[in-house]
Each structure stands twice: as C-alpha cells, then as structure tokens.
Amino acid sequence: MRLYSRGQVFFFCALSGLIVVMLAVGLGIVRFPFFRGGESRARQTEAGANPAQAGGETFQLQQSAYVDPRIIKTAELAAFSEDERENIAVYEQLNEAVVNITTETVAINWFLEPIPQEGGSGSGSIIDTNGYVLTNNHVIESAYKVFINLADGSQYEGHVVGTDPENDLAVLKFDPPEGTELKTVPFGDSTNLKVGQKVMAIGNPFALERTLTVGIVSGLGRPIQTSRQNIIRDMIQTDASINPGNSGGPLLDSLGRMIGINTMIYSPSGGSVGIGFAVPVNTAKRVVSELIQYGKVRRGWIDASMVQLFPALVRYARLPVNSGLLVSRTSRGGYAERAGLRQGVDPVRYGSSVIYVGGDIITSVDGMKVNSLADLYSALEDNKPGERIQVLVNRGGREIQLDVTLADREESLR
C-alpha cells in the first residue's frame, strides 16, 4: 500500500477542487461576479438600453469642431514642407482625441480565489463629446474592467456599450467631469480610397502613448480571417507602422478624417513589417449607431439549417456541385420555406448528427458566391432582418433564383 505525504494529499485535494470548480463554471452551475458574464455583462446590457432607441430614431453623434489642416498656416509651421505641415496639423488637432485603453482580467489562484490581474492594452478614438469611444472588440474582449486614459493623464473607468465581434468593433463609454470639452475624431469615407494615398495612424504601440506613424494605402478590399474564424471584408491594407497597442486606434487620411480602425498586422516576428490592416470606417459608421442603441448589431439570416459540402457528402449523395451549402431543414412556416427553399428529405447519420439530403444547395447569396458557412456570414454581414435578398440555388442540377426575406439571426440560431 502506497503512502502519501501531507503535502501530496493537500495538492491532490486542491487539484480535484479546482477541476470541480472549473467544470461547474463551464456548465453554468457556478458563476463569479468578477467575470465578464456577471457584473460586466449586466453593465453592458444596461448601457445598451440607450435612450436614443426610443421611437426607433438613429443615434446622432456629437463631435467637436475640426479645422482643415490645409488652411492652417501659422508662423510656427512656416519652416516646414507642405507634407510636414499636414502631418503636424493633423497630429496637434487629433492626438488628444485618441485614448489609451487598459484592461484588467481575472484569474483563479491555487486557493480557488478569483484575483484581478493586469490585462492588455490598446487604443481607441473618442467619437462623441459625451464620452463614447470606438475601438476593437479584441482589445476589451476578455476584460472585466476597462480603463480609458486621456492625453492629460487622467484615467476613467469605462463600460462596454456594445460589441460587434464579426467586425472586431466595440463602443465604450466613460463619463468625463461636467464641463470637460472632449476632442473627437471626425469620420471620413472609405468608399473612394486609392492605393497610394497617404494615411496616418495614431495609437499607443507598446504603451508609447499617442504615437504618429505615416504610410500609404497598400491595398483595398482585403478579406481577412480573424482569430474567431470570421472573415472581415474590404479591409484596408497599409504600410503605416502598426504594432501591438495600436489596435483600435484611427487610420486617418491627409485631412485628418478617420478612414479605418487599425485592427491587425501580418508579422512573423511580432513587430511591424509594413503589412497592417484596418476595418473600413464605413463599416464602423454602419454599426456604431446600433451598438449604442441596442448593444449589438441586428443581422438578417436565412432561417434554415445548412451544411457545408464536403467530399464524402458529395460522393454519397451524388451531388451536382462540389461546393456550397446544402439545405438540410427549413423552419416550418418560416421565410425561407415560404420563399420556396426546399429542405432535404432523406436522413443520413454523420457522426453524432443527422443530415437530410435531397434539398437545395445554396451557391450564391445577395450576389456573393457562397462556398462555406464563413462565406454566408460575410454575405449577410450588412443585411438586416426583414430585407429581401436574392439566393441562387442548385436544385437537381438546375440553377434557380429565389427571393428570400431574412429572419433575425439571433433568433434563428438559438
């Protein structure tokens, strides 16, 4: 019979207790108020119930005055070139509108006690004089506390107003003292950007606050897959130096207007190699109002269960195409069924799930070719519940176009 020391017994007991607690948390039996699912989530929901949603009106941002840098000609700038004057004027007007965001997270120690610890940091743009801040979702995703640090050294605790993980965007809110005049970053337009035009990034790389870097637009329309396996469409590629800590900060044109939100870099080394990506500002403008009003973005969805085609399924069912989404089941009486979308009829067990074959195969949605579920999410990213879209399906080798009214995604995927 093997004997254990008192220390070994204590270790095994502690380890067993930790495993039990982790299982309980995972199953939802136990919840710590320190985690984002507790106190912070309640605060997010409360913030989402914005008075601006009353009457269904769109939230209108209140922004500070901004002067075109081309007309700023002071004696102090006379010694600089025109390009340098632009850079200086944009930075002097906007650097105070860029904030440093720091977070705290929670860990569990060996005694099963939740303890706060320092989280990550990033950047954000003040977009409203009442204290609304636009940043990336991944900057604040795992935080239970968020702190917003201003240019004058003051720090405020913020709360999450709304998040859009699909576009990696989030809106925060802090409450400045009464009488504080906040500077804001003006929104531009990302529709007519050109490869080669000058851009500027202001952010907090490696916690070096309000750093300005300059570059050009290196590419447009880049579909980039995020760590959440989402694909963000139409990303702006730039060679302006972007490093850890720049995330969430503004990408500006030569007039100081926000054209993108710096989000990620391609870097084998971890530092900037001149390939950075920004979410286009038109995407942000589309979702910010909903994030402030509702705390989330309402998106449309085809109310049917769909299966991404894979070789074994194509061979077994002798399907006429190799890629697309097989309609397994449609919601009874739902929009998709009423539009004529046909579900499968023959059940086939695949692993632990059942697939119904024989239904339509979706190949295009709203004009975008659909090969995977990720493509479907991308195609419907900017569509709202109640909108009608064109869906192209393959039915027994024939292509058929259907007009489908979209359901609410959140309700459809419950």
Image: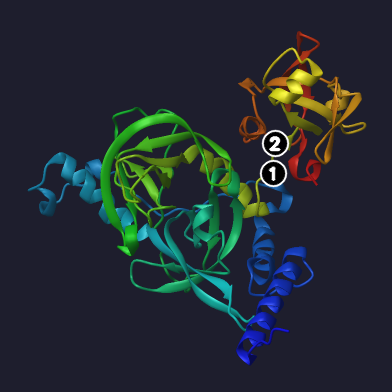
In the displayed structure, would residue 240 be above or below residue 174?
above
According to the image, label 2 marks what residue? 384
Q: Residues within 10 Å of mark 1 (few under 14, many from 20)?
A: some
Q: Where on the picture, by quarter, is residue 99?
A: bottom left
Q: Is residue 408 visible?
A: yes
Q: Give above or below for 92 relative to 151.
A: above
Which sits in the foreground, 383 or 111?
111
Rendered view: 60 above or below 195: below
Residue with the most extreme top position: 398
Please tell me in which quadrant of the rendered image residue 68 appears.
top left
Task: Give the residue drawn at x 34%, y 38%.
Answer: 238
Q: Residues within 10 Å of mark 2 (few under 14, many from 20)?
A: some
Q: Position of residue 152 (x, y in %)?
A: 33, 70
Q: Is residue 31 visible?
A: no
In this image, 183 relative to 349: left or right? left
Element marked by disc 1: loop
Question: In the image, residue 264 lies at what x, y percent?
Answer: 43, 46
Instruction: Kindly state the secondary structure of the residue where label 2 is placed.
Output: loop
Q: Label 2 amino acid?
A: Lys
In the image, residue 36 sits, relative to residue 54, either above or below, namely below
Q: Are marks 2 and 1 in contact (CB under 8 Å)?
A: yes
Residue 8 location in percent, x, y? 62, 85
| Viewport quadrant of the N terminus | bottom right
Left or right of 265 on screen, residue 305: right
Q: In the rendered image, which residue does mark 1 sit on?
A: 298
Q: Position of residue 278 (x, y in %)?
A: 43, 42
Q: Which mark is residue 13?
A: none
User: What residue do we see at 62% from left, 21% from top?
Assistant: 369
The amino acid type, in three-letter code, at marker 1 is Arg
Task: Please state which of residues 244 and 261 is positioned toward the viewer in this rendering.
Answer: 244
Protein image colouring: rainbow
